Image (spheres, grey):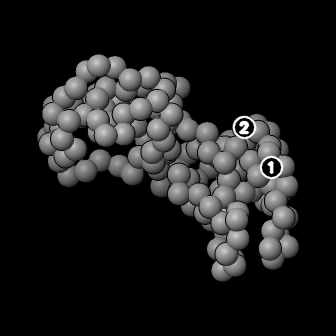
Amino acid sequence: MIVKTLVSKYVAREGYRFLFSGPLAECSNCRFKSACINNLESGVAYEIVKIYGIVNKCPALGEVVTVDVKPAEVEVALDSRAAIENVVTTYTYRNCGVPCRFSELCRNALIVDGSRVRVISIRGGIKCEIGRNLTRAVVVTVTTKSK
């Protein structure tokens, strides 16, 4: 689902992805609150898909630009038993303590630990350094842990 929001002019480019962590203190009395943070869900990653030429002043971020965003598709490592297209599962951070090239997939910063995610596609198996049965998958957040 595509929604409009406001982002800092410094990140306003198509394809930019961000994790919405919730409103800042300055947002509570801002006149743009309904057009900005009310359209976003805390704990969900979004991707900018369209930029409008509308610039406003934000009490927290300075100059902000109106954009369209959609929930971002994010690549992660899932337990292979849960890595089935269109299945909703829980994304859990894995911290094995062994540095490897898949560490960012096991603890992707764009997905909140414990969030429910829908598997969009499968990218193949992962050769885990400690022998876990993991699969590389593309997911989108359905609901966050806080719900």
Residue in front for this viewpoint, 133 or 105: 105
Residue 36, picture quadrant: top left
Q: Check disc 1 and report the residue beneath it.
A: 83
| Residue 68 coordinates in the image, percent (x, y) | 42, 25
Residue 38, picture quadrant: top left
Q: On the rendered structure, is 133 left or right of 102?
A: right
Q: Check disc 2 and report the residue beneath it.
A: 120
- For image coordinates 70% across by 63% down, the residue present is 102
| Residue 75 coordinates in the image, percent (x, y) | 66, 48
Kindly tell me whether residue 3 is visible in this rendering: no
Classify 10 Å Cα crowding around label 2: few (below 14), some (14-19), many (20 and above).
some
| Residue 69 coordinates in the image, percent (x, y) | 45, 30
Q: On the rendered structure, is 68 left or right of 106?
A: left
Q: Secondary structure at mark 1?
A: loop
| Residue 72 coordinates in the image, percent (x, y) | 55, 38
1 or 2: tag closer to the N-terminus: 1
Q: In the rendered view, tell whether residue 93 sits above or below residue 96.
A: above
- For image coordinates 69% across by 78% down, the residue present is 98
Residues under labels 1 and 2: Cα distance? Answer: 9 Å
Amino acid type of the residue tagged 1 in the rendering: Ala
